[in-house]
Image (cartoon, helix red, strand yellow):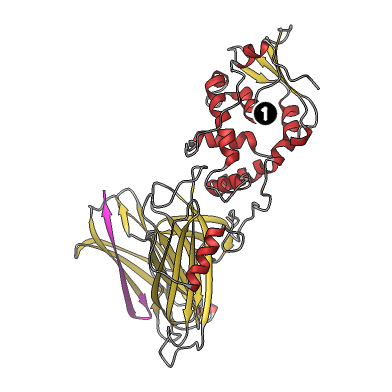
Amino acid sequence: MLPRAAVSALVFGLGLALSPTPAAAQGDRPTETELGWLESFLMTAEERRIMIRAVSAGDRAAFRRLFWMRRDPDPGTPANETLDHYLGRVRLAHRTFSEDGGYGGGDRARVFVFLGMPVSAIPQPPTETTLEGLLWVYPADPANGLAEDLRARYRSDEIGSLWLENRDGVDEALEEMRQRLIVRPEVAYETDDAGLLRLPNLPAGGSERARRLLRRLVEEPETSGMPFRVTPAFFRVEDHATYVALAFETEPGRLAVGSDGQSAASAFAHAISGPDALPDEAAPVRGVFRRESAYTGLVSPDSPGGLETSLVLPPGRHRLLLGLVDEQSEAFGTAEIEIEAPAFPVAEPTFSSVVLYDEATTTLEYGAGTPGRAFQFGRTHFHPRGDAVFRQDETLGAFYYFYAGERVDDGDLPEIVAEYTLRRNGQDTGFVRPERLPTTTRQAAANAEIELREFPPGRYELGIRILYRDEVFETERTFTLIR
C-alpha cells in the first residue's frame, strides 16, 4: 500500500487544494444534469441494465426516486446525506475538469467524484505510440470495498483531454464500492403488472408519517390540512360491484421538493358502507364494508400534483375518507366525500363515467386498473385531466364504456356507433364525427381523440350520442379551451 502523502505532482494532475471535499449546502438542490452525472458515476452494473429498461418504458422518474431511496442512510430526514456528499464532489469536479468532456469533466471527474483525491498524481511521459499521460494512485480500502491499490492511467488525446486507458479495470475495482453505497437494499426495483417500476406502496413499507396519517384518517377523520381535489370515475366490474377510480390533484407548489429534485406524495382512500352510509333498506350490503387503498407517486414541483388510486365497491351510497401526505415533509390533508356507486343494471343500456384525459401511455404488458394505476385499462394508461382545461396545441381525449345492457353471443355482437359533437358557449361548431365502437358481449369501449388547434378559446360541451338498436343514448362533458 502506498503511503498517504501528497506529492508535488498532485497539483499538476488535479489543480485542487488539499482540503476536504465540500458537501452540497443543505437545500441546494441538484440540477437535472448533476443528478444524471451522479447516477452515472455511482450506478451498479445491474442498475444500469434496469435504468435502460426504465428509460425505454418512460419510467425514468420512478427509477431516479428508487435509486436515491436505496442510498439514503437516514430516510427520516428530508435530506439525502449520500446525495449531498457526492453532489459537492461533482460540482468541484465540474469546475476543475470540465475541459476533459463537457459537464462533469469526463474520466478524471468520474474517478474523482467516486474516490476523491488520489494520494499520488504522477505525470507519465509520452511513448512512441501515445501522448503524455497521468497516473492516479489510490490505496486499498477493504472496509469500503476497494480490495487492492487502484491505479487509474490516463492518456492525452490530440486536443489535450485525458482519458482512462484502463477503464474496464477501474470500473471492475469500483463495483464493490458502488454496491456498498446501497444502504437500503429492501428498496428494490420491482415492477407492476404493466412492467413499470413500483414505488413502495403504503402503508406496507412506507414512511412512518404516511402510516401515521392512515391511522389518523381511519380512527380520527378530519377535513383540514393541505387542500386537494378528488375526482371519482365509475366503471363496471361485474353486476354487483363497481370499479371506482380516484384522481387526486393538488395545486402547483403544494408539495415540497426533496434533495433528489423530486416531489413525492401518497394518496389514501378508506370506504365505509353500512346502515349509516347506506340507509336504503334495499342496499345490497348490510353491516360495515371497509376497503383501504394507498399509493405513492412522483409529481412535478411545477405542475399540479396528480396521483391515482382505486376502490372496488358494491353499488350504492358510500362515505369515503381520503388523505394526501407529502413524503418530503409533515404536511398532509384529509377530506370526506359521499359518492353513489352506480349499479349498472343488466337490462338498461348506460354509460360509464367519461374521463377527459391529456395523454395516453401504451404499456408493454396487459393489465387492469389497480391501485396506483387507477386509469389503466388493457395496455393503455390514461392521464385524466380533472380540471378539464386544455390548450389549443393539445388533443382532447375522452375515454368511456357504453354498456349495452344485455349479454349476447360472440357471433351476434351488436353494432354500436358513437357520434361526437362540439358546442361552444351553447352554439354548434359544426364539428361532427361518427365512429363505430369495438364491442364485446357486454360492452363497447370508446377512446375518442380530437385535435383542438382549429377551435378558438372558450367553454365547450363535448356531446356523445350512441346509436344502438334504433335508439339514441346521450351524455356530455364540458371543458375549457385556452391558448
Q: Residue at x 74, y 35 (%)?
A: 144
Q: Is residue 373 above or below residue 63?
A: below
Residue 276 position by quadrant: bottom left
Q: Considering depth in this image, is 257 or 366 the residue closer to the camera?
A: 257
User: Residue 452: where, in percent of width, then height?
Assistant: 30, 53
Circle 1 residue:
115
Q: Which residues are magenta?
A: 467-483
Q: Residue at x 63, y 44 (%)?
A: 71
Amino acid on which disc 1 is placed: Leu
Q: Residue at x 32, y 48 (%)?
A: 393
> SS class of the residue under badge 1?
helix
Q: Considering depth in this image, is 303 or 131 the residue closer to the camera?
A: 303
257 left or right of 155?
A: left
Q: Main secondary structure of the magenta part?
A: strand
Q: Residue furthest bottom?
A: 281
- Label 1 packing within 10 angstroms: few (<14), some (14-19), many (20+): some
User: Residue 50: where, in percent of width, then height?
Assistant: 64, 46
Q: Is residue 320 above or below residue 226?
A: below
The answer to whether any part of residue 46 appears in the image is yes
Q: Is residue 323 magenta?
A: no
User: Residue 192: where, in percent of width, then height?
Assistant: 60, 59
Q: Considering depth in this image, is 198 or 289 the residue closer to the camera?
A: 289
Number of disc labels: 1
User: Residue 180: where, in percent of width, then height?
Assistant: 71, 40
Q: Is residue 478 magenta?
A: yes
162 left or right of 128?
A: left
